[in-house]
Image (cartoon, rainbow, N blue to C red):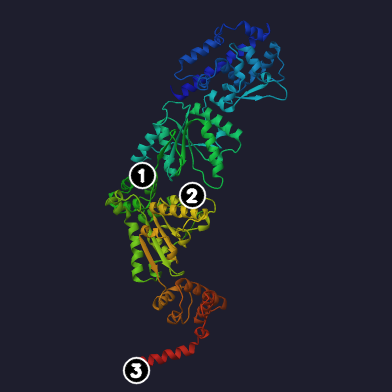
Amino acid sequence: MSKSTWTEDNSAYLSAALDWLRSRLQSSAREEDPMAKRAKKAGAAKNTGTSDPASEKMKQLAESMDSPPALDALAAALEMSAFERDVLLLSAAPEFDGSIGLLYREAYLKLGLNPNHDAPSFALAMALFDQAAWDSLSPLRPLRYWHLLEIDQRGPQPLLLSALRVDERIVDFLRGLNRFDERLEQYVHPVSTVDDDGLSESQEKTAGLIARQFDPGRRQESTRVLQLLGPHHGTKLLVACNAARALNRQLCTMHPEALPAQVAEIELLCRLWQRENRLLSLMVLIEHSSGNSAERRDAAAQHFIARAGGCILMDVREGAAASREVRSFEIEKPTRAEQLAAWLKALGKAEEDLARSLASQFTLDLPDIRAVAGEFKDSKGKREELWDACRAQVRPQMEMLALPIKPRARWDQLVVPEQERLLLTQIAAQVRARSRVYEDWGFSSRMNRGLGITALFVGESGTGKTMAAEVIANELRLFLYRIDLSSIVSKYIGETEKNLSRLFDAAEDGGAILFFDEADALFGKRSEVKDSHDRYANIETNYLLQRMEAYSGLAILATNMRSAMDTAFTRRLRFIVNFPFPGVSDRERMWAAMFPEETPTHALDFRKLARFNLTGGSISNAAVNAAFLAANAGEPICMNSILAAIRQEMIKLDRPINENDFVWAPAVVERDRKTKHKEDVA
């Protein structure tokens, strides 16, 4: 039966039910006391209105429909008795036919009742219908348990005579509109259907395993909880959608932050959710919570899980406790081979090198791969645009834990010895070739950990460690994040480890280089345990050692105190690059490359400037200060302004000052230059 045909038949059935109700109201009379009348009928159960034509018409219409009418379906789903079903119809009738409300007062008068209102009540229902039962008024019976009725009980008025009104969601259901209750939408959000081809083969297998954990029938009375482990929320959502579709259920998401704080409000939410689950057949994915109030939100989520029942999935990052009743499934993004196959299918065999590069660096779901590839398929600058689009797609959400650095430095600006430059180029080359070595050449099958690349940059402050990290990020076209220690380190036990976990999880998908400046603050040596502070400090270091080894991306550690680093990090480091104090020739190159082409300069002697023992960072500071001095004087940058800036830098660094070194006499310099030139010619 088509939906339109069922809707028409349901409307006809509802009209017949209203006719039957109208006849009951019109034929009501006070022949005797309603309680005595009901006592006489005890033991002789009667079918409601079996002799009148309206009742016969209702029966015929219901039998002719392939699916039961909404009133009968609701009564079956919520396990209502025949009397409770009639009470619901009596209370809902004014919503369908405004004129029927006029019959209520007449019925009250005929029955000798004085409720002081024209709305239906339990007293009116008990007088009108057969098989009336007092337990229908109980909060544990369907009418009140499922919040089907709104009871307007004012002051001392008894419950029996209070006005009844049907919940709006139930009125819509009786009309044939089975929509999601809008009161739940502030807590629970239905998820639209996902693409049929959105899952990889490995993900389809996991979705099938999850679906088999639940009862494939329409209802799930008891609570069944599964944990979905892993950092990829989008992938979990994709798998959950397909598992729900296999069970013919509607998936919804819930974030613990949205849950109410009061127990009574959570109880109402659970009751409404149970009702919706019976009417719509639902499954919920409770998302991961984090932050300062995570403990309270998790407690609210646990209350919901314990009371709501049904099919419940929990988005858990890692380490959540499970039991015999709670199974866990590891949810991962497609394998590198599956991603490569998707890229090749989207880009074509001719772009195999590009596909391999994208699959090696970025971890994307199949729908994301198809979307990105389709957007730039016919672009001339396809490689660069595709790379940037993928990088933006996996941009790590860790701005609260790290500071983004826009890499500007290039190889020609980095002044380091040739040996160190070779090591830096090897770091970039290994990032590019990871997929070929680990996947194509099979090294990943022999290595459980250490698939990432970790490098330690050692050198004094200002010797180029941060610039080298920028150069690598610029070369690889990846995001560079400086780790904010103030956001990572916490005085509360366990919080530092949680922050580190969030940091590494956010960067796992690629597109980011982690730069730990002043790394000895985090990676310091473990000490002998003398008190609880030493114990928990060592626990943090132990966790960091394990997490760094499991990280699959590029992490760069920078320190000027290598001796303070824990020795256990040495084995886990792929590269150690020393940044020595620059010599005279290196400093001369730095000064020559320090000023942009558009900067106005006059008669600069870089050999003279290179005699000052400064690092690259101090040279950069002096050049910027000299530019401001010259700009304020309204002249180009000259030796006097640079020497003045160098003098300020030396004082800041607490270096000894020889005033003669900062005197610049252009005429004397020019004379000495000419004299030397003549001597060279002779």
Residue 12 percent coordinates (x, y): 52, 18
What residue would you read off at disc 1?
334
Q: Is residue 603 above or below residue 473?
A: below
Residue type highlighted by circle 3:
Ala
Q: Between disc 3 and disc 2, whose residue precedes?
A: 2
Q: Is residue 402 above or below residue 149?
A: below
Do the numbered discs 1 and 2 sit on residues whose CB atoms are within 8 Å? no
Q: Is residue 141 visible?
A: yes
Residue 431 percent coordinates (x, y): 35, 57
Please identify, in this view, whether the residue under mark 1 or under mark 2 is nearer the observer.
2
Q: CA distance from mark 3 to mark 2?
A: 74 Å
Residue 118's image quarter?
top right
Q: CA distance from mark 1 to mark 2?
A: 26 Å
Q: CA distance from mark 1 to mark 3?
A: 76 Å
Q: Which mark is residue 498?
A: 2
Residue, far bottom:
682
Indicate left or right for 468 with 173 as reference: left
Residue, far left:
441
| Image quadrant occupied by the C terminus | bottom left
What residue would you read off at disc 3?
682
Badge 3: few (under 14), some or many (20 or more) residues near its Cα, within 10 Å?
A: few
Q: Between disc 1 and disc 3, whose residue precedes?
A: 1
Do the numbered discs 1 and 3 sit on residues whose CB atoms are within 8 Å? no
| Image quadrant occupied by the N terminus | top left
